[in-house]
Image (cartoon, rainbow, N blue to C red):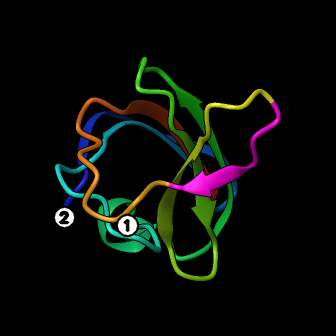
């Protein structure tokens, strides 16, 4: 269960603050609880202060960042117009879920 990262853009904002923009493609089998993601190993970013997502795919999953666990979580709605968000079910293929993400931190 891995994410595919492409087009990384690494910028220093001021002082030690950094910003990394990357395209993320989901894995073939989503794991309930989120997809492990290590900004420290991938970008050298020890403290993530904010993550902004821009979903770019038609699959319709809404991404969020779990700050405590360093995971990308994906959410979906039911068929009803007022349905609540539920985490994507375990083992769902999310390879067509492509999103841009901006990680900002130290």
Determine whether, in the image, residue 98 is placed left or right of residue 64.
Answer: left
Quadrant of the image containing the C terminus:
bottom right
Depth-wise, is mark 2 or mark 1 nearer the camera? Answer: 2
* Residue 87: x %, y % from top left: 54, 59
Which residue is pictured at 61% across the width and 39% down the height?
78
- In magenta stretch: residue 86: yes
* Residue 103: x %, y % from top left: 57, 50
Mark 1, Cα crowd under 10 Å, few <14 / some 14-19 / many 20+, is: some
**Which quadrant of the figure has residue 90?**
bottom left
Whether pointer 2 and pointer 1 mark residues with C-beta atoms closer than 8 Å, the reply is no
* Residue 65: x %, y % from top left: 60, 59
User: What numbered label is drawn on residue 2?
Assistant: none
Determine whether, in the image, residue 62 is placed left or right of residue 7.
Answer: right
Nearer-N-terminus badge (2/1): 2
Which residue is pictured at 47% across the width and 31% down the height?
100
In this rendering, the answer to whether 70 lies above or below 76 is below
Mark 2, Cα crowd under 10 Å, few <14 / some 14-19 / many 20+, is: few
User: Is residue 33 something that shows in the picture?
Assistant: yes
**Which quadrant of the figure has residue 83?**
top right
* Residue 43: x %, y % from top left: 38, 59
**Which quadrant of the figure has residue 38?**
bottom left
User: What numbered label is drawn on residue 37?
Assistant: 1
Quadrant of the image containing the N terminus:
bottom left
Depth order, front residue of 102/60: 60
In this rendering, the answer to whether 103 lies above or below 68 is above
Give the CA separation, mark 2 to mark 1.
10 Å
Disc 2 target residue: 1
- In magenta stretch: residue 25: no
Which residue is pictured at 75% across the width and 48% down the height?
84
Depth order, front residue of 63/68: 63
Residue at the bottom extreme of this rendering? 68
């Amino acid at each position: 269960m891995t994410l595919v990262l492409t087009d990384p853009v690494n910028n220093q904002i001021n002082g030690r603050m950094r910003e990394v923009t990357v395209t993320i493609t989901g894995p073939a089998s989503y794991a309930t609880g989120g997809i492990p993601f290590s900004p420290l190993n991938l970008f050298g970013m020890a403290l993530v202060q904010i993550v902004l997502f821009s979903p770019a795919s038609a699959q319709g999953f809404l991404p969020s960042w779990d700050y405590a666990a360093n995971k990308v979580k994906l959410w979906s709605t039911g068929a009803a117009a007022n349905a609540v968000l539920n985490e994507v079910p375990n083992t769902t293929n999310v390879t067509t879920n492509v999103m841009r993400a901006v990680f900002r931190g130290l």
